[in-house]
Amino acid sequence: MMGNAHLAFGTGSFLIVTSLVGHTPGIIELAAVALGSLIPDADHPKSKVGRWLPGISHFFYSFCGGHRGFTHSALLVIPMLFFAGWLMEEHNSQLGWFGSDALQGSVYGVGYLAMLAFIFGFLSHLIGDAMTTEGLRILWPLKAKLRLTPLRADSKLLNFFTWWLCIAGIGMHLYSSYQALI
Ligand SMILES: [Zn+2]
């Protein structure tokens, strides 16, 4: 999957899932899911994020398992979840300051939501790469490869699917906002 398809796949599926659970994501969450859906390709100097971070992408490419190495390992989700847990704890311990238990009521609560969105985007990227014929060593450095479809990374079918996912996600949120109005 290429950069724009990852962005559409991550953001689109995030919009669908949040709509299904009745949560309206804020702009910070949307930015976090978009970033998470692109960040694993920071290990490729020619990718979208790789071009934004030339020094870092060359470093990962040369020293951390090449493209689809370290930054594409689902094991990275473990420290991310610990960080999200810490943000949640901080949010809970600050309830007295903000007088509300709404997550949006504290910096840590907003950070927690953003972290969950980032993890969602990150995992969507890994699934997106595993949907291509090259497959993905999803638990890198373990060698086991996950390959979900025989489609090429630049497949028009994959692109078509991701953009429709995005349109469906936006449509679902617009529909629920409309329902809330009438
Ligand atoms: Zn990738």
Image (cartoon, rainbow, N blue to C red):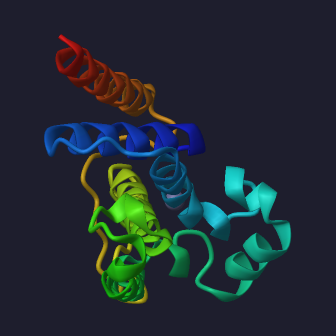
Residue 63 relative to residue 120: left or right: right
- Extreme top residue here? 182
Residue 4 position, x and y percent, is: 56, 38
Residue 142 relative to residue 57: left or right: left
In the depicted structure, whether residue 157 falls above or below residue 73: above
**Picture quarter containing residue 11?**
top left
**Picture quarter containing residue 144?**
bottom left
Residue at 22% over, 37% down: 19
In the depicted structure, whether residue 96 falls above or below residue 164: below
Residue 65 position, x and y percent, is: 58, 83
Q: Nearer the viewer, residue 42 or 181?
A: 181
Residue 84 position, x and y percent, is: 37, 79
Q: Quadrant of the C terminus?
A: top left
Residue 29 relative to residue 48: left or right: left
Residue 151 position, x and y percent, is: 36, 41
Q: Nearer the viewer, residue 177 or 13?
A: 177
